[in-house]
Image (tube, grey):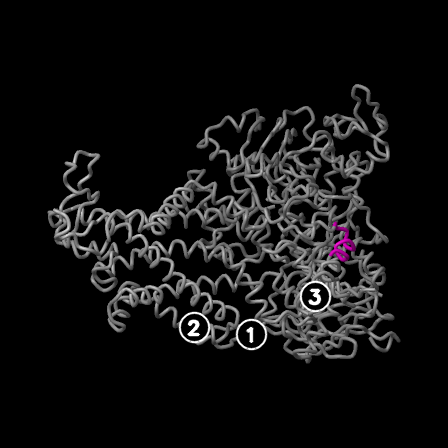
Amino acid sequence: MTVQDAAVPQTEVQDYRNNSLLFLTFRRLFRQRNAQVGMVILGFLVLVAIFAPALAPYDPDRSLIGIEPVEKRAGPCIHALGCPSDQPQHIMGVDGNVRDQYSRIIYGTRISLFIGFSTIGLAVVVGTLIGAVSGYVGGWVDNVIMRFMDVILAFPSFLLAIAIITVLGRGLQNALYAIAVVNIPVFARLVRSSVLSIKELEFVAASRSLGASPLRILFVRILPNAIPTLIVQATLSIGAAILEAAALSFLGLGAQPPLAEWGTMLGSERNQVFTSPHLVFFPGIAIMITVLAFNLLGDGFRDAMDPRLAQLTKR
Amino acid sequence: MTAKTKTKRSKAQTSGSHGKGKAPLLEVQNLKTYFYTDDGVLTAVDGVDFQVAEGEVFGLVGESGCGKSVTSLSIMRLVDPPGEIVDGRILLQGEDLLAKKLAEMTRVRGRQISMIFQQPKSSLNPVFTIAEQIIEVFKIHENISDEEAKASAIELLRRVGIPDPERKANAYPHELSGGQAQRVMIAMALALRPKLLIADEPTTALDATIQAQILDLMQDLRDATDTAVILITHDLGVIAELADRVAVMYAGKIVEESDTITLFDRPLHPYTQGLMGSIPVLGEAKERLEVIPGNVPSLINLKPGCRFASRCAARQEYGLEICERVEPDLIEMEAGHKVRCWLYQEYEGHTPPLRKGGGR
Amino acid sequence: MKKTTKRTPLVEVRELKKYYPVHGGLLKRQVAEVKAVDDVSFAIFPGETLGLVGESGCGKTTVSKAILRLEEASAGEVIFEGEDVLAAGGADLKRLRRDMQIVFQDPFSSLDPRLPVGESIAEALLVHGIGTPQERFERVLEVLRKVGLESYHAARYPHQFSGGQRQRIGIARALILDPKFIVLDEPVSALDVSIQAQVLNLLSDLQAELGLTYLFVAHNLAVVEHISHRVAVMYLGRIAEIAPRDNLFSKPLHPYTQALMSAVPKKHPADKKERIILSGDVPSPLNPPSGCRFHPRCPIARMGHCDVEEPQLRELEPEHWVACHYAEEFI
């Protein structure tokens, strides 16, 4: 209590943008060990996704039968590690259709990141709108919307996703919709509770007493202040969404072969786990690292926005 | 009987003799508690010395950020990171609390030193009845049966003025009003007859008529027990009601210390004087209030010299330049009345304008 | 009250009521009402400060918010310059709001943490479509200087200010539309004493300079006495006593006002103070006592009368109104 009240030095004039709450949050974020690791991994994954064509030695979808002298499901061959140089190099081996697994993993990065951002992006937008209306309007509107969200939440999310795909039909696009839908209630509830608490703050009442319209108050005053909690949840949810998409694809409900999706790769080679372990090992590791990166970053965000930490630097 | 009118005895007047000759119960020496923040080291408590005698009510008064609460948390060793006690000694009956192991410290808390807080309702656990919570205090520290503990708990509740204590003992915290919750907190704090009670803003969150009740209760308890109290508050009125001696804190340092009556009669430090002038007094409405200009300085990257210098009217009046260079010491002006100000202290090349005779 | 004064009030509150429904049970049916404000009337005259004082839960904040339509009243009228604020809709309300502003208690939650304070202050101009960006900017700097801050402060964020400075910013925001009437809702109770004095003096200066009318809501009697011209004391949703400041504080006629005054801690440790200590707590407005709401705690209550009949405000001395059956005893 004593600490937070220590006044900020008022004399020096500095660039004020450097002192916005967002800036301070990011400054703390960059000092978090967890977040640093998460950001490095994520940055690496994004670069891989962008430069996939340059990094991948082979076309991920093209079979090498008749092009190269490799066996189906051949193990990794790395020249630097003593693989005879007359054999073609396949860092992670080739799969059951004689495609270069390394290239497929690299292209799979694109798909996984796309899945994560698009599903959660959709869920955030729809969930925010629903939650904002629900929290701000209140009354029976709130009651109806939130009971409906409760119903969605009451299903195990994975089963619900499967049910949605059963209706829409299998395929990556429908899997994305399904994952987005099961995530909507999470964000709707989060935004609603943020709106409910921010609505009671006095600066909102100040806006009302100035004559500002309800829409302006909701979108200009309240929602921007809910963004920090949204970022934390969204980051953590992206990791979970990638995992869900991989699981759906593993079951054959999401991305369909020959698309280089990690879950699909796992699923189509799952029977060879004892004979060709490299075909499940590498996609599994790729999924794990990506999800880990988002979780680390999400935890870092949460710590950076922790009000107790914030008090020490905020004022 | 719906209300009682009572004349307050004023123990404060006779309290000057308190603690003289005896060894102090608590002695805080050169306490420094710093907080390591992103922006730098915040010197929340920066070299605080004071003593509390047995049975005495020692007031610690100051505005937010002056370090009064951090001082009390330091005594309890409850400072959490990024805060850290970096220097000093805290002697309770001659034993240094800062040298104790954490397990030993746990036995000190509650048994020898206990604490009451500003928000009584959030200090009580909502899922247990108040009797259960008081009994728990007994059970942690003493080996007594449930029945004895329960009887003691009810007796305690009766002593702190809870009406119908047998029934109220089974109430949950949410069934209590703020004033009753503070009474329960006081009961819990006094359960083990601690030698020292730290009361951190005990009446600040309460309404005026309830504050009067609690002040009244604390006066009764002060007279009935030999527990010493460190009373932390921003309200000079509460100090006037309860404290025997008082220390005024500003920006992590004690700037003035004396017995309460002397402080109110002849405040020496310009900050104390300004503080007293800036409070509106009931029945003495005036056109304008005296004002201490400016704000409390940041405790990060402090400038050298007196921490109050930039806001000090007396410094300008007397044209003192030493204030911005050298920090004054806490010196004893007259018996028991200490002040930290260049108006009173000599230094090489500096003649204090008010060395003899006290206030302006 | 109209009888005793020839002045026309700027704001007149008539029989204001605010009941909060209490819902319970599975179907969330209304099971009870909290009568937070129950039939409150008073007038505020141009250029004066009316102090509204009482303990928590007495309804003083609800009254102040209802006047500005930050809370919708259940019944009653608020006449501002001849127009009923509570009945005004859309454009009329927006126009009225230019003249009626509020300063809040909590300097930490009353400013949007994401915005430089200059933008928070300018919002009112934006909402009402006043001026060009350049004019708005200059107007912001003008009010900042008026409340004792510097122009470079406009570009700073709320977290960079101390509590006192934030309260100045809150005042600047209230001033920017040149209002006639400002509700001050506990504006200094969250501030340190030395800062409190600065803000109180600033409020007095602004009132003298701009001819403002204040409704000053607070729980601290000494602060209210310092700043007010007239004072109303509230207890459990009703006005117990209302009078010019000096009359009220030199001769309080309601036993509750007397208890409130005697509860203020003494100013010097050597003072001997006769103190009326009220027993018990403030009863819940959910289930207020019958008759006079103060009777269970009142030292002079007469059973059979006070617990049956609710006292109305009576003018016992010029402009000194009190709601107590036995107030004559104190004259």
Question: Label 1, on which residue?
Answer: C21
- What is the chief secondary structure element of the magenta stretch? helix
Q: How far apart are marks 1 and 3 (CA)?
A: 36 Å
Q: How far apart are marks 2 and 1 (CA)?
A: 23 Å
Lateral position of residue C68 relative to residue A59, left or right: right
Lateral position of residue C283 relative to residue A184, left or right: right
Question: Label 3, on which residue?
Answer: C125
Residue type at numbered disc 3: Leu
Q: Residue furthest top?
A: B348
N-terminal of the two: label 1 or label 3?
Answer: 1
- Note whether C328 is above or below B39 in the view shown: below
Give me the residue at 72% from left, 76% from top. Answer: C78
Does residue C87 show up? yes
Question: Label 2, on which residue?
Answer: A145
Badge 1 local density, few (<14 within 10 Å), some, or many (20+)? some
Which element type, helix, strand or loop, lies under badge 1? strand
- Where does the magenta region start and end? C141-150
Residue B146 in picture, x, y percent from top left:
41, 46
Lateral position of residue C62 relative to residue B163, left or right: right
Which element type, helix, strand or loop, lies under badge 2? helix
Badge 3 local density, few (<14 within 10 Å), some, or many (20+)? many
Question: Contact (CB < 8 A) between labels 1 and 3?
Answer: no
Residue type at numbered disc 2: Ile
Q: Quarter of the image containing the C terminus of chain B? A: top right
The one nearer the camera, B57 or A12, is A12
Residue type at numbered disc 1: Pro
Chain for numbered disc 1: C
Residue B220 in picture, x, y percent from top left:
65, 45
Q: State yes or no: residue A75 in magenta.
A: no
